[in-house]
Image (spheres, rainbow, N blue to C red):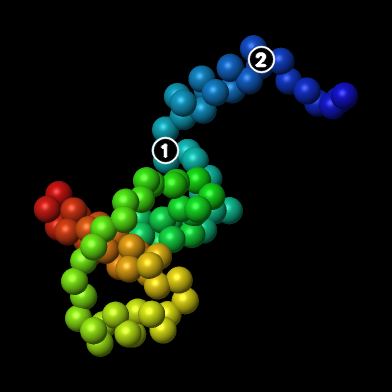
Amino acid sequence: MLKNKRSEEEIQKEIIALKAMPDSEIDYSDIPEITDSTGWYRRYDRKIFKPRKKAVCVRIDMDVLEWLKQQENYSALINDMCRQTMDEAQRKSA
């Protein structure tokens, strides 16, 4: 049994205190900076965020397809490129 086990009441009190804390008081010094959502997505999508996938048929120029197929896991690369384009378009329209 853990010696430092906290009660549910203590945990709830801490959660309430943390929710009341302004962002300016949060210490982010030990967290690496995330500069954009696509960087976050590429690092953590397979561990945390698993969007549904759908098979589609698209027409791609042959030279582009040949280049893509030379890359490792090219279907994931296509998805990442599309997501980056989508994120940029959403940022511009916001």
**Up-down relation of residue 55 to residue 50 (above or below):** below
Q: Residues within 10 Å of mark 2 (few under 14, many from 20)?
A: few
The residue wearing badge 1 is: 23
Residue at (42% x, 40% y) in the render: 24
Please identify the residue farthest to the bottom as the structure is shown: 63
Provide residue 48's location: percent of width, then percent of height: 50, 46
Provide residue 33's location: percent of width, then percent of height: 46, 58
**Up-down relation of residue 45 to residue 78 (above or below):** above
Residue at (35% x, 79% y) in the render: 68
Which mark is on residue 81?
Answer: none
Q: Can see residue 84? A: no
Res 80 quadrant in image: bottom left
88 left or right of 75?
left
The residue wearing badge 2 is: 8
Res 1 quadrant in image: top right
Numbered label tally: 2
Q: Residues within 10 Å of mark 1 (few under 14, many from 20)?
A: few
Q: Secondary structure at mark 1?
A: helix
Residue at (54% x, 23% y) in the render: 15
